[in-house]
Amino acid sequence: MKAFKRIAAAILAITMIFALAACGQKSEPAPQQGDQGSQQTQQPAADSGKKDLIYVGFVQVGAESDWRMANTKSMQETFTEANGFKFEMVDAQQKTENQIKAIRDFIQKEVDYIVLAPNTEAGWDTVLGEAKEAGIPVIIVDRMIQTNDDSLFTAWVGSNFKQEGYDAVDALAEALRRKGIDPTKEEINIVTLQGTMGSSAQIGRTEGFAEKMKEYPNWKMLDKQSGDFTQEKGQEVMESFLKSYPDIDAVVAENDNMAFGAINAIKAAGKTCGPKGEITIVSFDAVKAAFEAMIAGDLDVSVECNPLHGPRVKEIIEKLEAGQPVDKIAYVKEGVFFAAEAAEIMPTRAY
Ligand code: GZL
C-alpha cells in the first residue's frame, strides 16, 4: 500500500511542476514547520532524507488483563522505527465506541495500515467501510468481528476460542482425575466467570465448553456471569456465587485474571482450591502469573491463548508491501498447562 501511495505522490508532484512552469507562476515557498496554520507537507522520502516509515495505527482493547499487557508489549516491541515503522496505539479502555473513534482518527491521519483488536464482535461495518473507502487496509488481531462483507478486512490472526472451550472440558476432566475424582461418575457442580460479553473470546469459550460438556451428563453448570476479564470483577462475581451455591466443585474462569479473583474469594470464604483443594479451577490465557498460581497450588490448569501477535502482523504487512498474497484467516497454535508441570515449563515461557 505504501508503495502505491509513493508512486501516486510522485506523479502528482511532476504534473504540478509542469503545470506551474507552463503558467509561468512563481511557486510559493513550502510552508515552514511552525508557520501559523502551516500544513504538514509530505516531503518525498529523498528530500526529507528520512527512510520512509510504514505508518501503523493500532486500536487496542484496553489494559484489562496480563494477557492484554503481553499483547500490547508484543506489538510495541515489533513496530519500532528501527524495524521501519511509525507506530501509534490507542487504548480504548474496553469501550467499542472508543475504538470506532480511534479508527476514524487514524483515517484522518492517513495511516498506511489500521490494526484492530476488536473489543466486541458487533458494529464494525460502517467504520471499516470508511477505512476501505480511504484505501487503508485493516488487519484484525485476537478477537473477531461479525460481518457479511469480508472485504472490510484484509487479514485476521488470532485464537480459535471455541476450540479453547473444548480444550477446557478435557482439562477439567483431567484435573479431576488427577485428584482421584472420576469425571464420568461423580456430580460436578460448575460456575463460570465469563469474559467481556459479546467478545469472541467470551462467545467461543462459553459455547465450546457448553457443547463439549454434554459428554459429561453428571456435570451441572450452576451459573454463568461476566467478570469482564478483570480480577476485581471476577472476585466480586465469585463472592456472589459462593453465597448462592454452597456446593461448587469447579470454576471455569474465561481468563487468568478472573481466576486470580476467584482464588481470593474462595480463600476469603474459608474454602480451598487448586490441585489439593476442594474446588478445581480451570482458566484461560496461561500468562506467567497463572504459572505462579499453579506453582503456589491455587490453580489447577490454564488453557493457553497466545498474545504474541506483533511478529505475525509484521509478516502480513511485509507481504502486503511486497504485493504478495496473505491468508485471510490464521489461527495461532496453543496448548494446555497443568499445575504438576508448571515449575518445569515456566522458564520456557515467552509471556
Ligand atoms: C483472548 C483475549 C482475551 C483474554 C483476556 O484472545 O481477547 O482478552 O483471554 C483479555 O485476558 O482480556
Image: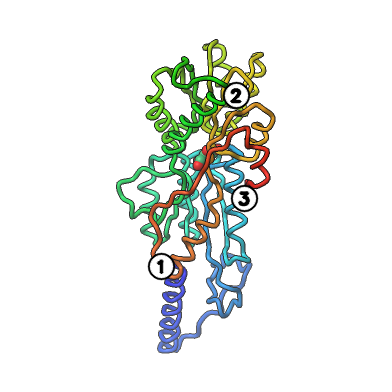
Q: Position of residue 248 (x, y in %)?
A: 53, 15
Distance, label 2 to label 1, CA atoms, is 47 Å
Q: Amino acid at mark 2?
A: Ala
The amino acid type of the residue labelled 3 equals Lys
Depth check: give the residue in front, 178 or 192: 178
Please give the residue where the numbered disc 2 appears in the rendered image: 262
- Look at the picture and state if 44 lies above or below 194: below
Residue 265 spot, x, y in % from top left: 63, 20
Residue 151 image position (x, y, % from top left): 33, 55
Residue 116 seen by the camera: yes
Alpha carbons under labels 3 and 2: distance apart: 26 Å
Could you tell which of marks 2 and 1 lies nearer the N-terminus? 2
Q: Is residue 301 left or right of residue 18?
A: right
- How packed mark 1 is, by other alpha carbons closer than 10 Å (few <14, some 14-19, many 20 or more), is few
The kind of residue on which mark 1 rests is: Gln
Residue indicated by mark 3: 73
First-in-chain label (3 vs 1)? 3
Asked whether disc 2 touches disc 1, contact meaning CB atoms under 8 Å apart, the reply is no
For image coordinates 44% across by 49% down, the residue present is 331
Q: In the rendered image, which residue does mark 1 sit on? A: 324
Query: From mark 3 to mark 1, how far is it between C-alphas?
Result: 27 Å
Task: Using the rendered view, name the quadrant where residue 13 is placed.
Answer: bottom left
In the rendered image, the quadrant that contains the N terminus is bottom left
Residue 266 at x, y percent in the picture:
62, 19
Tell me if residue 94 can be seen: no
